Image: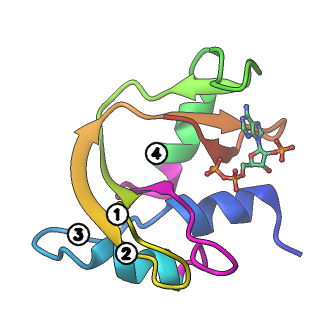
């Protein structure tokens, strides 16, 4: 069975990925990472930084997550990310996504072992 930490890596980590100039990045990656099975996951972000750097976010101070839990942490530095957002009118099983590269601080939820399990913002 997939652990929450493995699930986070599948859904959010693409350390060596490079979406630059590939408008199909999200269409390909959302399918390849199995987020278009059963439904089209509406929004998802991929992080293009080393896993050790993303894990290190877990030692930042705890902050409130969107769901009210307090196990979230914000990165000190900006990180390279790609936001994937389902296109208006896209209907399962034809999941079509907008691909938007960005560089910003990210917020993740971590578990008791201080590994990321959820991408909050
Ligand atoms: P994501 O939210 O990263 O897109 P997900 O498939 O929704 O991915 O999985 C989030 C995982 O992080 C879940 O295992 C969730 O646990 P619960 O199902 O028990 O909620 C876990 N998680 C841990 N802390 C969380 C938090 N503060 N907010 C949301 N999910 C959290």
Q: Earlier in the sequence, mark 1 or mark 4?
A: 4
Question: Which residue is most to the left?
Answer: 21
Task: Report the span colored magenta.
Answer: 33-52
Q: Are marks 4 and 3 in contact (CB under 8 Å)?
A: no
Most frequent secondary structure within the magenta stretch: loop
What is the spatial separation of the Cα atoms under label 3 and label 2, in whole angstroms?
Answer: 16 Å
Q: Secondary structure at mark 4?
A: helix
Question: Could you say which disc has been placed on residue 87 in the image?
Answer: 1
Q: Which sits earlier in the primary sequence, circle 3 or circle 2?
A: 3
SS for tag 3?
loop
The tag earlier along the polypeptide, 2 or 1, is: 1
Q: Which mark is residue 53?
A: 4
Q: Quadrant of residue 84?
A: bottom left
Q: CA distance from mark 4 to mark 3?
A: 20 Å
* Mark 4 or mark 2: whose residue is earlier in sequence: 4
Q: Secondary structure at mark 2?
A: loop
Picture coordinates of residue 50, whole percent (x, y): 42, 57
45, above or below 24, in the image = above
Residue picked out by circle 3: 19
Q: Do the residues under discs 3 and 2 have CB atoms within 8 angstroms?
A: no
Q: Which of label 3 and label 1 is nearer to you?
A: 1
- At 46% across and 84% down in the image, what residue appears? 94
Left or right, 95 with reference to 49: right
Point out the tag, 3 or 1, that comes first from the N-terminus.
3
Res 26 → quadrant: bottom left
The disc label shown at residue 96, or none? 2
Query: From the image, which quarter does the N terminus lie in?
Result: bottom right
Asked if labels 1 and 2 touch by Cβ distance under 8 angstroms, the answer is yes
Q: Position of residue 120 (x, y in %)?
A: 57, 36
Q: CA distance from mark 3 to mark 1?
A: 17 Å
Answer few, some or many: residues within 10 Å of disc 4's Cα (few below 14, many 20 plus, some between 14 and 19).
few
């Amino acid at each position: 069975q997939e652990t929450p930490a493995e699930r986070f890596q599948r859904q959010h980590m693409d350390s060596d990925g490079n979406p630059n100039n590939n408008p199909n990045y999200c269409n390909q990656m959302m399918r390849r990472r199995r987020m278009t099975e059963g439904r089209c996951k509406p929004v998802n972000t991929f992080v293009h930084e080393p896993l050790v750097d993303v894990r290190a976010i877990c030692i930042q101070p705890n902050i409130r997550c969107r769901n009210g839990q307090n196990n979230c942490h914000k990165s000190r530095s900006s990180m390279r990310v790609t936001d994937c957002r389902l296109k208006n009118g896209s209907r399962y099983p034809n999941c079509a996504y907008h691909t938007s590269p960005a560089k910003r601080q990210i917020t993740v939820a971590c578990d008791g072992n201080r590994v990321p399990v959820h991408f909050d913002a």
